[in-house]
Amino acid sequence: MFDDIRLFRAACATRDPEGARLIAQRYIDQHWDEVAPHLGHLSIEDLVALVSAYRAAGRIDDSTVADMWIMARLPRQHITGELHVRMPSLTSQN
C-alpha cells in the first residue's frame, strides 16, 4: 500500500506524469473498496479542497491518495490563465 504511495510521489517529483498515472490507476484499482466510498462522489473542486485540507492537517498519505484518485479517475486538466502576484515588502528596505 505505502510502496505505491511512495512510488507515486517519486514519479511526481521527477516529473513523470505517465508513470505517476499508471501507479495511481493501479493503486486505485487495488484499493477501490477503501477509497471509492469516500472520494467517488466528490467534484474536482471538492477533491482539490480535500487535498489542501489533508496537506494543511499534515495528513500527507491521505492527500497523496486523493491526488492519485484525481489522476486516475478524472480527465487531464489543462489549466491556463494569468497569475498576479502581490509581493509585499517583508523588510524595512524597499
Image (spheres, rainbow, N blue to C red):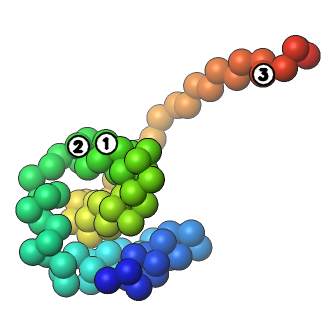
Mark 1 or mark 3, earlier in chain: 1
User: Is residue 59 shown above or below 79?
Assistant: below
11 or 34: which is nearer to us? 34
Mark 2 nearby-residue class (10 Å; few <14, some 14–19, many ≥20): few
Q: Is residue 46 above or below residue 14?
A: above
Rendered residue at 26%/41% (across/down): 45
* Residue 71 vs residue 5, the one in the foreground: 5
Residue drawn at (9%, 75%) of the image: 33
Q: Residues within 10 Å of mark 3 (few under 14, many from 20)?
A: few
3D distance between C-alphas at marks 3 and 2: 33 Å
Residue 66 appears in the figure: yes
Q: Amino acid at mark 2?
A: Asp
* Label 2 SS: helix
User: Which residue is found at the position 71% from the left and 18% from the top?
Assistant: 88
Tell me the amino acid under the disc marked 3.
Answer: Leu
Q: Which residue is mark 1?
A: 49
Return the x and y of residue 41 as percentages of the image width and height: 9, 53
Which quadrant is the C terminus positioned in? top right
**Residue 64 image offset from top left, x and y in percent:** 38, 64
Q: CA distance from mark 2 to mark 1?
A: 5 Å
Read off the residue under disc 2. Answer: 46
66 versus 89 height, above or below: below
